[in-house]
Amino acid sequence: MKYHIGLDVGGMSVKGGIIDVKGTLYAKKVIETEALNRTDEFIGDMAELILDLVKIAKVKKEDVRSVGLGIPGTVNGKEGIVTYACNIGFRNVPLAEILSKKTGIPVYLSNDANCAALGEVQYGSGKGYRDAIMVTLGTGVGSGIILDGAIYEGRLGAGAEAGHMTIRAGGEICGCGRRGCFEAYSSASALIRDTKRAIEENPDSEMKTVAERDGKVSGKTAFEAYKQGDAAAKRLIEGYVENLGIGLVNLVNLFRPEIILLGGGISNEGKYFTDMVERYVNENAYGGASNPYVVVRKAALGNDAGLFGAAALGLGK
Amino acid sequence: MKYHIGLDVGGMSVKGGIIDVKGTLYAKKVIETEALNRTDEFIGDMAELILDLVKIAKVKKEDVRSVGLGIPGTVNGKEGIVTYACNIGFRNVPLAEILSKKTGIPVYLSNDANCAALGEVQYGSGKGYRDAIMVTLGTGVGSGIILDGAIYEGRLGAGAEAGHMTIRAGGEICGCGRRGCFEAYSSASALIRDTKRAIEENPDSEMKTVAERDGKVSGKTAFEAYKQGDAAAKRLIEGYVENLGIGLVNLVNLFRPEIILLGGGISNEGKYFTDMVERYVNENAYGGASNPYVVVRKAALGNDAGLFGAAALGLGK
């Protein structure tokens, strides 16, 4: 049996898992470790985690074919270099080579959103599809692009940043400093911002009741009021779906994936929501019905998508 | 010596050329022929043109390694099928196979904008670059994407339609029926529309003088007044460069090409114009200076880019 290890790397913790080619999970471990200002120690902690996983899973190290890492930042996967990842304080670190020397196992890197997309295509909602785009609707909007079964990361790993596509020039301010980004309209944070505004403008809306009951406005507030038939929530959700759809149509017009996978908290709304998005995308994509249909589906692996995808980086290598 | 034939296919005429691998042109011929409602005859005319070029160039047919066609529509290059091309009335035509049987030479197809991009990368302004995007600013906005030296056409050839990326949702109406497309702001037609509006609003502008002298408003009107220091023209051109830049930044954030090539009438403004665009793109692309620099340059081959690129489809095959 051959095994693959995947690490989902964050600034405060690293989650690791060991799987076989079918995606069976043999061991999983999370370590708390600080990355900033202690790069060497942080890399040492990751090497230890890798070797720990081998032990916990009780497999032979020579049967572990690869280690894959999902990195929160810009990665040159071809060269195995973390170009720039501010959350872990890495700049031009040849991490694949360093970790490979420390562990004796070949190491592959990619961006964490790319890994999540690969994980879904290998083991989740995108199974069986070769061309897929995964968009994660969380604090920001993450995107991973799979072309013909492999991660597409742009030249030198500096592409695939769909969240910062301008869809409404001059519009809402984005975390990146520019205005009108896809992320500034489609993230959970954007929906919460817009829900607060809508409550302000429509004090009689059900959204206010829901928010008061929950003690806060969340990404679910407007959806719940929408399902209750609230008019202001309907306008808000339809606008949200339109903005999300506009960004996705832009991606469809460029890549024409077979399937779009939606992840992050908002995607938990489930099928009625992904159906609304799927309708918008297919009605508005260039060429209409004369071009191939695009499926929109909720991602399946949740927070483990990145781990599975990282492990899958070494498949077939 | 090995030769490659390229055909640039239009609804009313087909332009053909025969080149060697270095791009030396041995013969060129344009035929007037109607495509609509006479598909078989049209294909026959193309076959005749191909065999004519072999004769005119006085080369042996067995030394002609390939014929490439640039098609105005959606093409599945892998299968050699014209999926949908309304200008020539083709829908699901296995053109590569048909023409190959008629001529005895292997035939390859791609979209015409993709061919133009490949032509520039092989023989024009993009020579030496492996990752390039060409954007043609004409009546519409055409786009061709070259990744690692090869045309990227999206799955089943139904991608790479950058002109219909939304950059200002709800904005100007586009020929495709939607609003706010890149094309609706960056085409020569869009600039002419905006120049007319600006003249209306600023009757004292130099733009009016230029237009009256020329007897019409063209894509050059505002640029000429801008160079004369006209304030309204300055606002207009800066806005045009911003909109063009926004669309290009979207593409950079996804693909991170080494170079962007601008074609079409507007690109004739030359270096001061491409420099303005280059500055905007690099100041606004995601990751700023920590990501690789993107060069913006005027395309070199003009109306022959498509022909050279079509011929280049068969290189290395």
Image (tube, coloured by chain):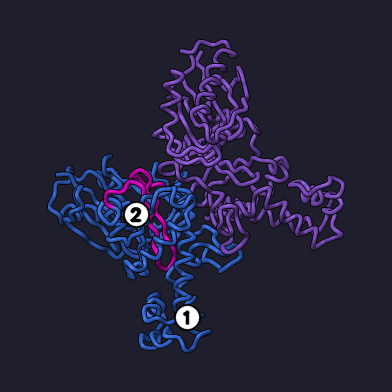
Chain colours: A blue, B purple
Sequence-first disc among 2 and 1: 2
Q: Mark 1 = which residue?
A: A232
> Which range is magenta?
A127-152
Give me the chain letter of mark 1: A
Residue A53 locus on image (x, y percent) = 20, 55
Could you tell me which residue is drawn at 54 percent across and 11 percent down?
Answer: B59
Residue A226 locus on image (x, y percent) = 40, 78
Could you tell me which residue is drawn at 68 percent across and 44 percent down?
Answer: B274
Could you tell me which residue is drawn at 32 percent across and 68 percent down?
Answer: A270
Residue A43 locus on image (x, y percent) = 33, 54
Q: Mark 2 = which residue?
A: A117
Q: Is residue B295 magenta?
A: no
Residue most extreme to the front? B37
* Up/down of A298 relative to B263, above or below: below
Q: Quadrant of the N terminus of chain A?
A: top left
Which of the two residues, A306 or B82, is positioned nearer the viewer here?
A: B82
Using residue B45 as the reference point, say whether residue A17 is left or right of it: left
Q: Amino acid at mark 2?
A: Ala
